Amino acid sequence: MKDATRYASAKALYQTFGVDTETALAKLSEFPISMHCWQGDDVNGFDREGALSGGIQTTGNYPGRARNAAELMADIEKALSLIPGTHRLNLHASYAIFQPGQWADRDALLPEHFAPWVEFARKHKLGLDFNPTFFSHPFADTGRTLSNEDSKIRNFWIRHTVCCLRIAEYFARELGTPSTLNIWIPDGLKDIPADRARPRKIYKEALDEILATPYDRKLVNVTIESKVFGIGFESYTVGSHEFYLNYAAKNNVLCLLDSGHFHPTENIADKIPSLLLYADKVALHVSRPVRWDSDHVLRLDDMLRDIAHEIVLAGSDRILLALDYFDASINRIAAWVLGMRNMQKALLAALLDPNEKLSALQEKGDFSQVLVLQEECKSLPFGDVWDEYCRRAGVPERADWFNAVSEYEQTTLSKRI
Ligand code: RNT
Ligand code: ZN
């Protein structure tokens, strides 16, 4: 059957459920996704040599990792050419680009060290988001950064975060779209602490000091990301969920929920509407935990669909949506494209559900019909609507995008030895 015919018949079928596919397609394009730059180089960054630290890990040795800014930009460009829609790029401070002789430590980073990224973002119509990098640095070696007992180390990281606030303001000003500045620190302890309160008190005061720095709240959304544990910090995490929930509420900053940072049966979908009762926005790192915070590439699974459902109900102006995973065992561009496309597929599927009708049924207490309708929707031809979205966006349909990835692997990635 012709593609246009398939779309037309899907459209007619959805109409019988009271769903307009054109509205769904238009809405889908309103959800920019911040694509994480760090999938392309296994979270290495450019500012120093040395191993990844902070209790996070990439596994796999798939050839072709980007080794410098030019390669990373080329790879991101390739990925974007296969992803429908206009999106954002999420950078870490460790991705500063220094001209010869310009190297600066993390507490002396300047907007000019990110000027090539702004140029790149402009070229691709991307907004930019930003993250201070509290790992892969000698001052993070003890596993304590902003919660460090040593004021010399702590102040270094406070200065770093303030530099990052300035850089995020610069991104927002240059690109005309607010920038999310996400604070995630790895700080924790391997074994059961003698004192759980003290590191949190030190950290709280460090955050207070950082946020006492004036910054333009219209330009920068400060978010704080919680976690349960890290590798080597299994027993205690300073920045726990409860710590940040209350800190965010009291200090007018936003919580960031990473879908891999909770207990394995916990689903962040359920947390989104709860937080939105009290906060203007919620930020997300959508990831896929497999038994632990493993940061696998997104699959179109039930967890993702559930998260997408809550995002769609909340609306694009209340969610700061970003992806966060790093798989080094497969082609890294395929990892980006698949995750970005799956996130959008999940959003589209949620937009195509008869959500108003389902809510009305719940309100009436007709739970049998809720269940029946929810299940029926799973076999509606949402793939035909997705293919139409890709067609209109001028990107390859179905798995055809993988041909471009394979070709790029042959011509470019395989030459990186
Ligand atoms: C780590 C956090 C954090 C990082 C990135 C690189 O567990 O999820 O968001 O993945 O900042
Ligand atoms: Zn994260």
Image: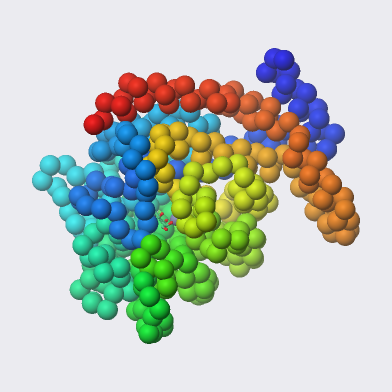
Assign the C terminus to one quadrant of the image.
top left
Vertical order, 127 against 231 (above or below): above
| Furthest residue toward top | 2
Vertical order, 192 against 312 (above or below): below
Residue 406 is situated, as x and y percent measured from the top left of the image, at: 42, 24
Observer able to see residue 318: yes
Assign the N terminus to one quadrant of the image.
top right
For residue 211, what is the image quadrant? Answer: bottom left
Observer able to see residue 124: no
Instruction: State how the image is colored.
Output: rainbow
Q: At x 15% / y 50%, what residue is drawn? A: 103
Residue 116 is situated, as x and y percent measured from the top left of the image, at: 28, 39
How many dots with numbers? 0
Q: At x 68% / y 40%, what residue is drawn? A: 349
Q: Is residue 176 left or right of residue 105?
A: right
Q: At x 80% / y 41%, what residue is drawn? A: 376
Q: At x 67% / y 30%, what residue is drawn? A: 383
Residue 35 is situated, as x and y percent measured from the top left of the image, at: 45, 43
- Tell which of 177 and 398 is nearer to you: 398
- Tell which of 68 and 213 is nearer to you: 68
Quadrant observed for ligand 2 in the rendered image: bottom left
For residue 105, what is the image quadrant? Answer: bottom left
